Amino acid sequence: MAGCGVRALRWGHEAAPLAAVAARISANDADPERLIWLESNLASLRSAGVALTLSTRSAEGLLAEAFLAGQTFDFIDLDAFGSPGALLQPALKTLAFGGILFLASTDGRSPTGHDRPGAVRHLGASARVHPASWELALRQQLGLIAREAWMLGFGLEPLCSFSEGRTFRIAVRLRKRPCPGEEAQLGMLARCSTCGAQQHQTLLKMRQWSSCNCLESEAHLAIHGPLWLGPLQDSDFLADLAGFSISLAPKTHHLLRRLQEDAADLPMVWSTAELAQRLRLAGPPPLAALVKALRCRGHRAAVSGVMASQVRTDAGLPELLQVCRDLDEEGFK
Ligand SMILES: C[S@@+](CC[C@H](N)C(=O)[O-])C[C@H]1O[C@@H](n2cnc3c(N)ncnc32)[C@H](O)[C@@H]1O
Ligand SMILES: [Zn+2]
């Protein structure tokens, strides 16, 4: 899925020189008309000493052939159009243990609940509309990667996950086997579409959902999953990335900083605009003050690195609303 080759070019010039061993890069796109562009755009990699193989196979064919030949890759970048689910097993089977899969999906409609039959087909999951839609789309995608990896006996470690609303990108490290308790990271999340209360459960301990603050006749739970409940980022990995002396665009620096400040290890995220609307406040509470106030009350809280103006916390909705109300009365100090 190399397209014009720009990603292979960057991996070759920016990442390969940092590798301990001489890099070999295989750039492939199923469209044969791309070959001429790959040849010319990646010519400088050859001059830089990178062993380059170009091909115009289907990714499935390329990966299957590598698997049969016993070849593994340390890094696979699948920059797919649409849903990449069908390529997960072939990619995971040819990824070295400790290797990294960097996966893109441009299918935003299925995991954000705008195409529910699509979510069942592409993710084997229930996806519903939610204010933290990008967060849940990434968690749906990670849930699928986890299930595919576990089926092969492997484990996974999410390294970073992000989106700008159109493309959902995830980097995961493959482990030879799951960590003890890794299965507890897969579960379901429920949100009452009347009052907005959220809760989650692991698949291992699924039981009845708790009541929210609505009257029984008014409560309406929209259930998402199975999805990944665990961390979306690995802060050590992000710190390493930020420490490399490669030139990054200011937007990329900003993204790395946002992700570093949010381990994203709690699945419940709230839009501050929604909280303000529920309280009929003039505007949303400032994120930094909200996070500070929640932490002062003994909660875990962080500014979401995934979507703007959202807070991640283990506080329940009634307390979250109370903190917002208090901040408003104090003049949002
Ligand atoms: C999102 S584009 C990649 C863009 C590329 N990163 C770039 O910067 O030009 C997806 C690419 O995947 C290719 N493609 C689609 N299905 C494929 C498949 N099954 N195997 C290999 N390549 C495929 C398309 O030809 C297209 O170039
Ligand atoms: Zn409710």
Image: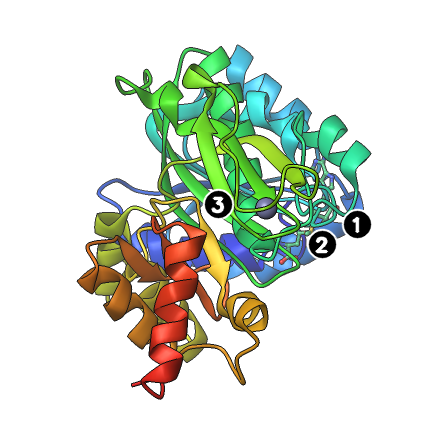
Hey, what amino acid is under mark 1? Glu
Residue behind mark 1: 33
Q: Is residue 131 left or right of residue 252?
A: right
At x 51%, y 66%, the residue is 275
Q: Residue 332: image x %, image y %?
A: 35, 84
Q: Residue furthest bottom?
A: 331
Q: Residues within 10 Å of mark 2 (few under 14, many from 20)?
A: few
At x 60%, y 57%, the residue is 131
Q: Residue 256: image x %, image y %?
A: 35, 64
Q: Which mark is residue 170?
A: 3
- Against 304, residue 283 (above or below) is below
Q: Which mark is residue 36?
A: 2
Q: Quadrant of the N terminus?
A: top right
Which residue is nearer to you in this view: 251 or 142? 142
Which residue is nearer to you in this view: 202 or 118? 202
Tag nearer the camera, 2 or 1 = 1
Is there any visible trace of residue 322 in the rendered image? yes
SS at mark 2 in the image:
helix
| Figure quadrant of residue 90 | top right
At x 44%, y 75%, the residue is 251
Are discs 2 and 3 less than 8 Å apart at CB?
no
Are discs 2 and 1 less than 8 Å apart at CB?
yes
- Against 123, residue 147 (above or below) is above
